[in-house]
Amino acid sequence: MPNFCAAPNCTRKSTQSDLAFFRFPRDAQRCKLWVENCRRADLEDKTSDQLNKHYRLCAKHFEASMICKSSPYRTVLKDNAIPTIFDLTSHLNNPHSRHRKRIKELTEEELSKLKKRKLESSVEQTEENKNSDTCEGQDSSDANDDVPPLTAEEKEVRDYLKSLFEVLVVIGKQNIPLNGHAEVERGSKSFTPSNFQALLEYRINAGDEVLRKRFEMTAVNTEYCPATQQKQMLEVCESCIREELLQEIRECRFFSLVTEELVEISGERHLPLLLRFVDQSNCLREEFIGFLPFEGDEETLTERLLSEITEKWGLNMEYCRGQAHVGSGVSVSKIKAIAARLTEKYPVAVCTPSSTCALNIFLANSLNLTGVQLVMSTFKKIDLFFSKSPLLLAELEHAISIFYQGNEEKANDLKEACRTTWTERHDSFEMAVDLLEALLLCMDSIHDNEDLRWNDQITNSAYLISEALSDFEFVVTLVVLKNTLSFTRAFGKNLQGQTMDVYFAASSLTAVLHSLNEVMDNIEVYHEFWFEEAVNMAAAMEIPVTVPRLYFRKQRPEAGMEIQPENYFKEHLTVPVVERVIKELKDVFSENHLKALKCLSLVPAVMGQLKFNTSEENNADIYKNDLPNPDTLPAELHCWRIKWKHRGKEVSLPSTIYDTLQLSEVKFFPNVYSFLKVLCTLPVLKLENPKCETARKRLKAYLADTPVSHRSKSLALLNINYDIKHDLDLMVDSYSKMYPEKEHFSDAL
């Protein structure tokens, strides 16, 4: 969507050139000066927030000394910048023209004040220029006359660097490892040159004169681009690509933070970070922004995360409206502590489950209990195991047919489910109980390998899974999870359903908690039934009912003291699971979170389902500071309800936030419009458009396709954000500013 300049007699728009456009400032005093200098009478009655949101001035209306770059990537104004260059007379040459931007006629007193202010501004700028260096990166369209032309030597360096950056971009986007083959032994060189070196040689042979001239006189075994320089150039590529995304997010203001499970890169654990926001076309998106090193305690990690977001990326955490963290294993407690610290510091950044993770899986992953983590890690092993070959899945389907000979319908349902990622479904624990005997038979058959169909890697993996499945702790934990989370299954499914389902789910949480509390009050009875179910399953698979071996090693009970399995698992499994599920639900569905979900009644279809008898005002205070005119909210909501209640018969009610935001008339309701855009960023709400999930899918594909030894934070960003445009000239400029040392450029000549 193009930006149009608000200055009188200026017809420039952002799509016609690379000229920078600047928002009116939010500061009321500065904004008033901008309006006065513009001489736009029709802007005087607008608030600074309205002007900041809807009006721009192009760089042509500012002195060159007022425009600079706060970083190598974006053009900004100085804090005290005031527009002073305007054409206020050219429209007089055509008196019949319809002048859209009405110019205000000034009195003598106002003219005198304007001239005085302009003179003061000029003096202030002159003094500033004397006391400080001219700011870097002035707008090229304003400063072309002051920039000396490049020498032949400098142009050669730029062309050489552009060739290097172009090769790096190709390597990143195509996910080609930088390194060559593995080393023969520690400290020795690789069998072949690195892939980067090989691609440079290919370009030289294909006729790249810049590279040929650079390297034609060097020895054949010379490293064209040292590893240190490669790393620096990759960091520049990463920064430039990320900045393209961040500019769009800053423009949209509000965002939510989403993290994925920890991954290993360069021998260290990293946390993948994604940002969710509503773009200029009112489409909800999630974009991958980078990896955060995950070393240190909770406080250190929180400070590092905030520093990355605010100082390095230039985002304002005051505009963060949600956070969702997907974690498992030993890292869960740290991630939950980080989320709690963020919520404490930014209360409106409500913590929610992620729309891409089933609620029951999210709850199970958050339970830091040995048995639960055993079940969840085994699920991952099973999922990875059957993804290796369709023959393995066929073996499982054969085992299912054996166990369900008398129930063909059930067998077919299970086979169909096994062709999906059933370990991530809302009913995955019910599925696991139904599949357990067939899974164990399948794993034992593959491990035995009587017909020698499987290699050692597959048989070893099957053995490890078989050992886990045949442990009574796994069986009883699976049964307890299935029964406990049966109370949250429908609730979680509705959260990932249509907007109407999500709205009613928010109201049903009380009933879910009531049911779980009833279980807790009668835990003796429930545990007895659940334990009996686990014992019967274990007997069918010939698994002995025992207390975990680790318990005896850690506790060392007194000699002769007998530990009953039923009492042990009640105390160490059933009670903790039910208690922690209740606590997790209360934590993640906080008061602010539920208020936000109940505001989904702003969507017309939900409003219609409620017979237009809604009261969003009761929950609107959570986002009151985000609204352009909060004082008029009650009246505007009333008009919004009336509009849809008395619509024509041929008009259908929009059923999602996305559909509602696409309506042209929604902008006539500025509070509702702003409310929906902020609400839409909550990570618990699903992405309506599958194309908006591209970043997450590409992240998973990158991690699945790239061996740990070949992973790179910078190359991953290039690969995952494949469609983001890249500017080689910008990369060269950025590199020159970040690494101006002479040795880089003397090497390049």
Image: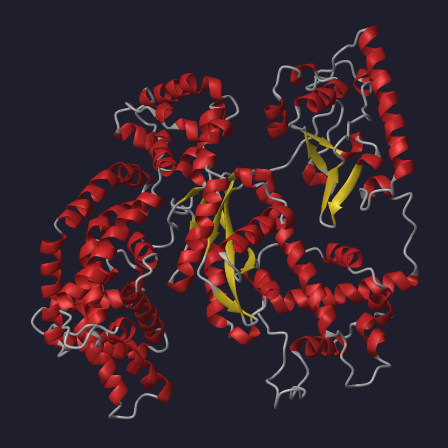
Where is residue 330 drawn, in percent x and y?
A: 40, 64
The mark tally for this picture is 0
> With respect to residue 197, does 425 lie above or below?
above
Choose between 523 and 625: the one closer to the eye.
523
Residue at 79%, 86% (x, y): give it: 220
**Residue sitting farthest toward the left:** 406
Image position of 226 (left or right of 351): right
User: Which quadrant is home to the N terminus?
Assistant: top right
Image position of 126 (left or right of 194): right
Which quarter of the figure has residue 395? bottom left
Choose between 636 and 464: the one closer to the eye.
464
Where is residue 577 drawn, in percent x and y?
A: 24, 56
Image position of 200 (left or right of 300): right
The colour scheme is secondary structure
Where is residue 673 drawn, in percent x and y?
A: 47, 29
Q: Is residue 665 visible?
A: no
Residue at 27%, 40% (x, y): give it: 505
Residue at 13%, 61% (x, y): give it: 530
> With respect to residue 451, does 177 lie above or below?
above
Where is residue 120 drawn, in percent x and y?
A: 86, 22
Choose between 57 and 249: the one closer to the eye.
249
Which quarter of the figure has residue 176? bottom right
Residue at 29%, 58% (x, y): give it: 425
Which quarter of the figure has residue 416? bottom left
User: Which quadrant is home to the C terminus?
Assistant: bottom right
Q: Is residue 650 visible?
A: yes
Choose between 256 and 89: the one closer to the eye.
256
